[in-house]
Image (cartoon, helix red, strand yellow):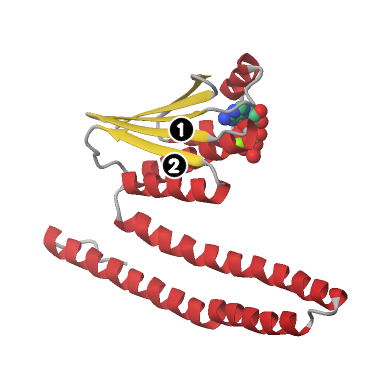
Amino acid sequence: MLPIFLSQKKFQTAVSKQAAEACEHILNEMGAELHDDLIQKLSVFRLYLDRLERATYSPQETERILLNMRTDFESVTMAVRRISGRLLQMRMEDDSFQTGIEVLCQNMAHERAGNVHFEYSGAPQPIPELSQTYLYRIVQELIHNAFKHSAAWHIWVRMKWSPHVLTLEIEDDGTGFNKPAEFITLLRKKNNTLKMRSQAIGAIITFDQGQQGLIAKVKYSF
Ligand SMILES: Nc1ncnc2c1ncn2[C@@H]1O[C@H](COP(=O)(O)OP(=O)(O)OP(=O)(O)O)[C@@H](O)[C@H]1O
Ligand SMILES: [Mg+2]
């Protein structure tokens, strides 16, 4: 906890010091995680390869080894995901909100093997932390929805800054949008986390038919 009565300069120095210490702590933690967990998990694969070489003439043994490799591979993926999640969080705290959204687009494109195009216009302005978190989650859910419900190949995330207004557009080229009117009515009515988060920060979320799929717009005034 920071003492309440401090000069502005002292306060900033104390905050920076705390932030640096927190980063240091996360880096140490991640270093230990890489060392104790991930490296051990990966070295098991060296043993698996040796065993596979010896089992060339036994299909049953080969199958058994492959089964174990598959399970262990899952846990390696999970470990990497955990570490990258922590490091990304750190990045989010440090970097601008816009960079956070751009990184989110890159990560989701990579995870889903799709294309998430990030575009922006105007000059970024500072917005409150809670709004940043909620807008980030809203974009995440809209991209997730596009991949899940529309089998989209391409998703466009557009960030438009104008003085005191930020507009976020998420559009997909999905083919799942066979009955657009029905889905749009459903989305407009449904009290989901998209709506709840928007209301909580005074943003307005709208859904319309885009060029091919759905276009969702979030208008946030600050
Ligand atoms: N990009 C999209 N393209 C086509 N249909 C969509 C799209 N996004 C949402 N929908 C439709 O709107 C519905 C409501 O979406 P919503 O995110 O509220 O719920 P959900 O994705 O079904 O469930 P949850 O978000 O809890 O996993 C979806 O079930 C789907 O039918
Ligand atoms: Mg959803």
Q: Is residue 191 visible?
A: no
Which residue does the numbered mark 1 point to in the structure image? 198
Element marked by disc 1: helix
| Residue sitting nearer the eye, 43 or 198 | 43
- Taking 48 as reference, is 164 left or right? left
- Numbered circle sitting on residue 44: none
- Taking 24 as reference, is 33 left or right? right
The residue sitting at 22% across, 29% down in the picture is: 163
**Amino acid found under the numbered disc labelled 2:** Tyr
Q: Quadrant of residue 213?
A: top right
Q: Position of residue 208 (x, y in %)?
A: 51, 18
**Residue projecting furthest to the front:** 57
Mark 2 and 1 residues: CB-CB less than 8 Å, in contact? Answer: yes
Up-down relation of residue 106 to residue 167 (above or below): below
Up-down relation of residue 169 to residue 138 (above or below): above
Q: Quadrant of residue 202?
A: top left
Q: Position of residue 157 (x, y in %)?
A: 42, 35
Query: Where in the image, quadrant-wise, is ligand 1 located?
Result: top right
